[in-house]
Amino acid sequence: MKGEIGMRLENRVAIITGAGSGIGRETSLLFAREGAKVVVADVVEKAGEETVAEIKKIGEGFFAKLDVTNREQVNQVVKDTLEKYGKIDILINNAGIVQDALVRKMTEEQWDRVVNVNLKGVFNCIQAVVEVMIAQGRGVIINASSVVGLYGNVGQTNYAATKAGVIGMTKALAKELGRKGIRVNAVAPGYTMTQMMANVPEKILQMMKEKTPLSRLAEPKDIAYGYLYLASDEAEYVTGAVLSVDGGLTL
């Protein structure tokens, strides 16, 4: 039954980026309930520490300050995780940002910032854990894409490009790493009620709901359950997939 403690990730070690709030926070708490030791990696220390405090009520984990664009910080998180737990079973590349603008008004800074966080940041984290997972002979990498990466969206050229890039990266790495025992998949959330949506006018939110066959926008937990499935042994024959969790929006 949805919401029950199933211990599907018992004794697994998971690094989750962008874990201090929104989808990352819900995923961290869900993974902890399912038995994982969770490394809450986030650039915002207060949010990350608050997530860890909730995790410790139900399981085990620690906070790691992380800007995914900073290779030194990424390597340090991996080092700290190995020192504490001795392995890394799961990497969830959940961290991401938006810097929306019509293309004729988009600044180079807006372009670069989104590409650096949403695409290069994913590369940084994968490269930092991949040798560990190869040595283990197993591992799971899950990357956050978006319906925008599949179908585009006005005013989000930079964001769409990064999320489409993540899909290409996922498929390439699934082929490259499968024989090493490493599964690589992506989740493509629909419009989800996180802080990113805070400034979207109610009229637009209502329009999105009306376009969605399930007649609502996603909650962070909806996406977290997608991550859980792909991280679990239930998906042991799934790699190179893009799981759309969008309420049917893209049908």
Image: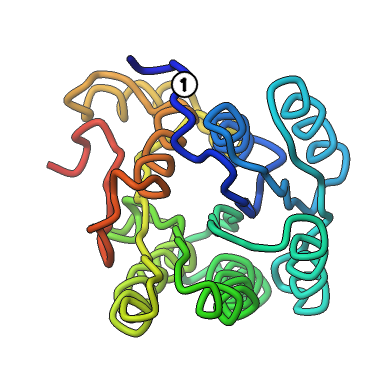
Farthest residue, direction left: 251
| Residue 192: image location, x then y, percent | 45, 34
Instruction: Identify which residue, 107 or 59, lies in the foreground.
Output: 59
Q: In the rendered image, which quarter is residue 236 located in?
A: bottom left
172 horizontally vs 194: left or right: left
Is disc 1 placed on a helix, strand or loop?
Answer: helix
Residue at 45% across, 55% down? 144
Residue type, mark 1 in image? Glu
Q: Quadrant of the N terminus?
A: top left
| Above or below 149: residue 112 | below
| Residue 103: image location, x then y, percent | 46, 69
Q: In the rendered image, which quarter is residue 117 located in?
A: bottom right
Residue at 32% across, 20% down? 216
**Disc 1 designates what residue?**
202
Q: Quadrant of the C terminus?
A: top left
Residue at 29% across, 37% down? 246
Instruction: Identify which residue, 129 or 204, lies in the foreground.
Output: 129
Q: How many marks?
A: 1
| Residue 26: image location, x then y, percent | 57, 31
Residue at 29% across, 74% down? 171
| Residue 207: image location, x then y, percent | 30, 26
Q: In the rendered image, which quarter is residue 195 located in?
A: top right
